[in-house]
Image (tube, rainbow, N blue to C red):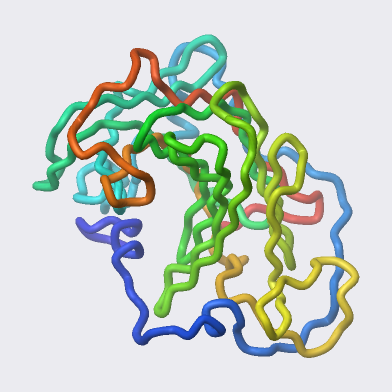
């Protein structure tokens, strides 16, 4: 979307035209399905950053949502996000020791008249290439602390794929989700209890195939959603599915919506996604979301979206 209102802010504010039933949220129209065909060709690396050196690569990343007319940060949604209580600041993005460090601090400020009580940090991929079916992978250590909201996600068009979101007060609770920000909007997510993941680095990945999307932590499958579902909304397998008429999952990512990838550390509002602090309270010095690498792979038969 052009203009001063960022695309991200616009879709987060978009509401459905009418109330949806529980069934409508899980089960879409029936369509002809030619059956499950699995692409077993090799994964090929198409984008990566190992965060060597001492600064962020400007050919790969921006430190704001570049949804203004000229891609700069000069728009009301370029440095704020949804229900976060955060302004994203460049100086909290650091690269050192072979890692990206996304910091946070309890400092109030305003962005285009929007008052926020904290500052956080983010990186957003740039360039003409946006990604569709593929494997989206990060190796990182999430921070621990009330209200902290680290996330790794992809966004483009009407489609959002959350590889993970954590709340700093519950670093043992993984959350992954899919969102279709159209009218009406659709969302579907999953959770899994894990050991305290803030204690060490872990590998997080999503594999988005034509007919299924799978979430992994350290190579373990923790969540799955299918492009097709049964009449109760339960996902059908991506492979080995019989041809015929099948219900669609209305929240499943649209292949035509090429995604940019985003990593951020925000602070939630008190009654937002996480239990954000009611008043700014500094976190321990050095609190950060630490990333060793980001990699995107696609099957050898696939190509990036234009």
Q: Is residue 228 left or right of residue 59?
A: right
Residue 278 appears in the picture as rendered: yes
Q: Residue furthest left?
A: 113
Q: Is residue 289 left or right of residue 79?
A: right
Instruction: Locate residue 278, reporting x and y percent.
Output: 21, 39
Above or below residue 68? Residue 179 is: below
Figure disc tally: 0
Instruction: Locate residue 59, reporting x and y percent.
Output: 47, 32
Q: Which residue is depicted at the point 68% across and 89% down?
A: 30
Q: Quadrant of the C terminus?
A: bottom right
Above or below residue 133? Residue 184 is: below
Residue 134 appears in the picture as rendered: no
Q: Quadrant of the N terminus?
A: bottom left
The image quadrant that residue 254 belongs to is bottom right
Q: Is residue 37 left or right of residue 131?
A: right
Q: Which residue is depicted at the point 86% across and 68% down?
A: 37
Above or below residue 28? Residue 93 is: above
Q: Nearer the viewer, residue 268 or 228?
A: 268
Q: Which residue is depicted at the point 19% across and 50% down?
A: 76
Q: Which residue is depicted at the point 36% across and 87% down?
A: 18
The image quadrant that residue 36 belongs to is bottom right
Q: Nearer the viewer, residue 72 or 208?
A: 208
Instruction: Locate residue 157, reporting x and y percent.
Output: 46, 64
Above or below residue 178? Residue 103 is: above
């Amino acid at each position: 979307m052009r203009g001063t209102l960022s695309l991200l802010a616009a879709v987060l504010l978009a509401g459905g035209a009418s109330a949806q039933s529980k069934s409508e949220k899980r089960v879409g129209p029936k369509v002809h399905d030619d059956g499950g065909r699995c692409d077993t060709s090799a994964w090929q690396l198409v984008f990566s950053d190992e965060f060597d050196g001492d600064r962020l690569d400007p050919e790969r990343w921006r430190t704001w949502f570049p949804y203004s007319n000229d891609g700069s940060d000069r728009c009301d949604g370029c440095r704020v996000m949804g229900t976060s209580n955060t302004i994203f600041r460049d100086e909290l993005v650091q690269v050192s020791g072979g890692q990206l460090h996304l910091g946070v601090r309890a400092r109030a400020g305003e962005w285009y008249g929007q008052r926020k009580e904290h500052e956080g940090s983010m990186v957003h991929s740039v360039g003409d290439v946006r990604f569709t079916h593929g494997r989206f992978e990060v190796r990182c250590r999430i921070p621990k602390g009330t209200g902290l909201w680290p996330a790794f996600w992809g966004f483009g068009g009407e489609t959002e794929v959350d590889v993970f979101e954590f709340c700093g007060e519950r670093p043992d609770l993984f959350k992954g989700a899919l969102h279709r920000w159209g009218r009406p909007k659709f969302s579907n997510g999953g959770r899994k209890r894990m050991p305290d993941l803030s204690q060490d680095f872990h590998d997080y990945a999503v594999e988005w195939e034509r007919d299924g999307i799978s979430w992994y932590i350290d190579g373990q499958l923790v969540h799955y959603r299918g492009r097709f579902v049964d009449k109760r909304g339960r996902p059908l397998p991506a492979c080995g599915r019989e041809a015929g008429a099948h219900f669609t999952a209305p929240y499943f990512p649209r292949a035509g919506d090429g995604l940019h990838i985003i990593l951020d550390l925000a602070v939630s509002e008190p009654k937002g996604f996480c239990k954000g602090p009611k008043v700014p309270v500094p976190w321990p010095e050095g609190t950060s979301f630490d990333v060793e690498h980001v990699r995107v792979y696609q099957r050898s038969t696939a190509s990036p979206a234009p």
